[in-house]
Image (cartoon, rainbow, N blue to C red):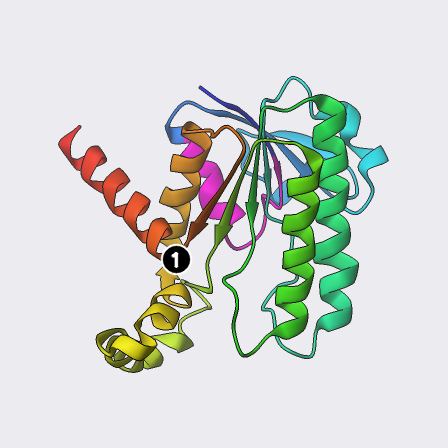
Amino acid sequence: MARVFLSGGTGYVGASLVPALLSRGHTIRALARSGSVSRLHPACESVVGDALDAATFRMAVSPCTTFVHLVGTPHPAPWKGEQFRAVDGRSLFASVDAALYAGVAHFVYVSVAHPAPVMRDYIAVRSECEERLRQSGLNATILRPWYVLGPGHRWPYALLPFYRLAEAIPSTREGALRLGLVTLAEMVKALVWAIEHPPQGIRTLAVPAIRAVSSAAAEASAEG
């Protein structure tokens, strides 16, 4: 079972990932600000610190062997470029520094699908974060969803007919698949799979791979 250090455990994806990991016997040490500790799952071991400052939490990462980074700007939008750099970028760099200090074996990062014709600032910051991971020498899994459907994030369901049409046309199929929509349940299953199957080197899971490993995990669970 993995010992997981988690940043972003109270967020949209993190709040669903935590119980999924706990149900499979993994242990979680979760980073949170002092005012957010009460929002963590009670079975998590809490670490009070600032996700933007590695010095506030790097001593608490060990003995965890997997670091999962989920900190980011809520509801990303094209006009939030400054927030992407101040929060998404700084927090990832701090988490990588803390993971290196602790000598973790596997780093898991949720980036974003790219290239894409919109959200340039968001993609630019996430791409810089991916490059930082590559330069770090850490074994890492990078997941690249485009939009994660779930509670409070349902409006793109209206786009599904257009996605199906684009996927059926050879000239637009690749882009439609790369920038496809995944559900929160699929995202959580893919993250659990990534944590339980650490790579050697850097592994990237784009939308088709996120869907595939999620489907395989669901089938395995049903058979079990």
Q: Which residues are magenta?
A: 6-22
Query: How many numbered callouts?
Result: 1
Q: Quadrant of residue 206?
A: bottom left
Question: Residue at 50% across / 28% down in the picture?
Answer: 200
Residue 187 falls inside the magenta stretch: no
Locate residue 111, reporting x and y percent.
Answer: 56, 54
Q: Amino acid at mark 1?
A: Val
Which residue is under mark 1?
A: 207
Identify which residue, 162 or 166, lies in the foreground: 166
Question: Quadrant location of the N terminus?
Answer: top left
Identified at 70% across, 30% down, the residue is 99
Q: Does residue 37 appear anywhere in the picture?
A: no
Question: Does the magenta run of residues contain 10?
Answer: yes
Identified at 33% across, 81% down, the residue is: 158
- Image quarter (top left, top right, bottom left or bottom right) of the C terminus: top left
On screen, residue 136 above or below 168:
above
Residue 59 percent coordinates (x, y):
78, 24
Extreme front residue here? 171
Image x and y of residue 92, in percent? 70, 47
| Viewer-proximal residue among 133 and 61 | 133
Secondary structure beneath label 1: helix
Q: Is residue 185 above or below residue 29?
A: below
**Relative side of 154 to 53, left or right:** left
